[in-house]
Amino acid sequence: MPRIVVFLTSALSTFFVLWLGRDLPEHVASHFGILGEPDSCLPRATFVALFAVICAVLPTLVWWLQVQSAKRGYAMHARFARKDA
């Protein structure tokens, strides 16, 4: 069940990025300076492709890392447990 949720989340978010990406301007601001002014732009195709890959890969990668960690018996809470407790 969790696997299906992860893959559905990846697929739907990727589709959402691709669908909305067609309405973006030709050049998309991709970085902003300290005053909030854009100081770097990407072509729309590059911007949409980058975010589509992130949306497709990141949820699956996080899920896979959690599964691998659980298989090896690692637990984050054990690393941060207080010694005096």
Image (cartoon, helix red, strand yellow):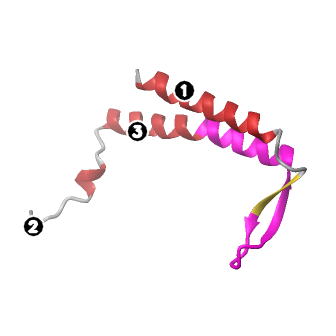
Is 75 within the magenta? no
Q: Nearer the viewer, mark 3 or mark 1?
A: 1
Q: Is 18 situated left or right of 82 in this image?
A: right
**Disc 1, SS:** helix
**Tag 1: Cα neighbours inside 10 Å, few (<14), some, or many (≥20)?**
some
Nearer the N terminus, badge 3 or badge 1? 1
**Disc 3, SS:** helix
Q: Position of residue 69 (x, y in %)?
A: 37, 39
Q: Is 12 situated left or right of 50 in this image?
A: left
Residue nearest the viewer, comparing 40 with 71: 40
Report the amino acid beneath label 2: Asp
Q: Position of residue 66 (x, y in %)?
A: 40, 38
Q: Which residue is mark 1?
A: 7
**Tag 2: Cα neighbours inside 10 Å, few (<14), some, or many (≥20)?**
few
Q: Position of residue 3 (x, y in %)?
A: 46, 24
Q: CA distance from mark 1 to mark 2?
A: 42 Å
Nearer the N terminus, badge 1 or badge 2? 1
Is 46 within the magenta? yes
Q: Nearer the viewer, mark 1 or mark 2?
A: 1
Q: Which residue is mark 2?
A: 84
**Disc 2, SS:** loop
Checking the image for residue 66, the label placed there is 3
